């Protein structure tokens, strides 16, 4: 009964490669996010989708491209990986429509990306 | 945009003592303030939240206070236990309207010494 799941959990790759991270939520939420957590533990939002539409696109290199095939899935594709992309990437979801707890974000387990 | 500052960055307390983490925010439109706890190697999880129409909220050993005039809010943990050791994040969000972006603080690493 995993609420927000991500695959893979660990990703070790060479500089210059292209990789994807997948995220799925079974909470019925309509808003999903990607966050990057660096070695200092800072949590920075990268993207957010609401009902498959991009609503937040922070200052992120265009090597990062999110894709939401439906409101339960939000994938992240990264082209030409660089050393500085090494971090933990968290997917999250929230119920953005209505309700008192609509802003509560439910995080996935994280994907630990190491670029060599 | 919103800017959330969090202090201290690290905090060590003896088991049984209290711990206080403070945050300030810049956007007066923010009215939803959640706190997340992230244990080592785990995901952040909501532990408590407060809205701007409330000044204080308690849940067992944790409490949050909000001073909207001064734009600061705090997390208080009483009778700390080793399992409270984690990184704590405050956050702020407009909290109303169609979509709200949540801005996180920089985190506080709390260590509870047995």
Image: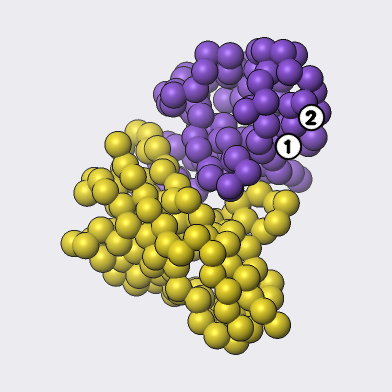
- Circle 2 residues within 10 Å: few <14, some 14–19, many ≥20: some
Chain that appears purple: A
Q: Is residue B60 above or below residue A50?
A: below
Residue under the image location 39 percent in, 65 percent down:
B22
How far apart, in angstroms, are the residues tagged by discs 2 and 1? 6 Å
Residue under the image location 53 percent in, 13 percent down:
A62
Residue under the image location 53 percent in, 45 percent down:
A42
Residue under the image location 67 percent in, 58 percent down:
B39
Residue holding disc 2 = A11
Q: Output the chain of dot 2.
A: A
The location of residue B84, given as percent across then percent down, is 63, 71
Secondary element at image label 1: strand
Quadrant where the N terminus of chain B is found in the figure: top left
Quadrant where the C terminus of chain B is found in the figure: bottom right
Chain that appears yellow: B
The location of residue A63, given as percent across then percent down, is 58, 14
Q: Is residue B57 left or right of residue A44?
A: left
Q: Is residue B70 left or right of residue A54?
A: left
Q: Foreground: A114 or A98?
A: A114
Asked if marks 2 and 1 touch (Cβ < 8 Å), the reply is yes
Q: Is residue B102 left or right of residue B26?
A: right
């Amino acid at each position: 009964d995993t609420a927000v799941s991500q695959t893979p959990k660990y990703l070790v790759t060479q500089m210059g490669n292209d990789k994807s991270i997948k995220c799925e939520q079974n909470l019925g939420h309509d808003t999903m996010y990607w966050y990057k957590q660096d070695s200092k533990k800072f949590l920075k939002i990268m993207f957010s989708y609401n009902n498959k539409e991009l609503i937040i696109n922070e200052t992120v290199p265009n090597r990062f491209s999110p894709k939401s095939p439906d409101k339960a899935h939000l994938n992240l594709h990264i082209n030409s990986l660089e050393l500085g992309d090494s971090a933990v990437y968290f997917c999250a979801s929230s119920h953005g429509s209505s309700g008192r707890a609509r802003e509560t974000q439910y995080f996935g387990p994280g994907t630990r990306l190491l670029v060599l | 945009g919103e800017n959330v500052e969090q202090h201290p960055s690290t905090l060590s307390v003896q088991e049984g003592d209290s711990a206080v983490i403070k945050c300030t925010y810049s956007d007066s439109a923010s009215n939803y303030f959640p706190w997340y706890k992230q244990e080592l190697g785990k995901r952040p999880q909501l532990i408590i939240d407060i809205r701007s129409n409330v000044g204080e909220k308690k849940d067992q050993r944790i409490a949050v206070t909000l001073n909207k005039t001064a734009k600061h809010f705090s997390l208080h943990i009483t009778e700390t236990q080793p399992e409270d050791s984690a990184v704590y994040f405050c956050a702020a969000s407009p909290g109303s309207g169609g979509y709200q972006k949540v801005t996180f603080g920089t985190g506080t690493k709390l260590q509870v010494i047995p």
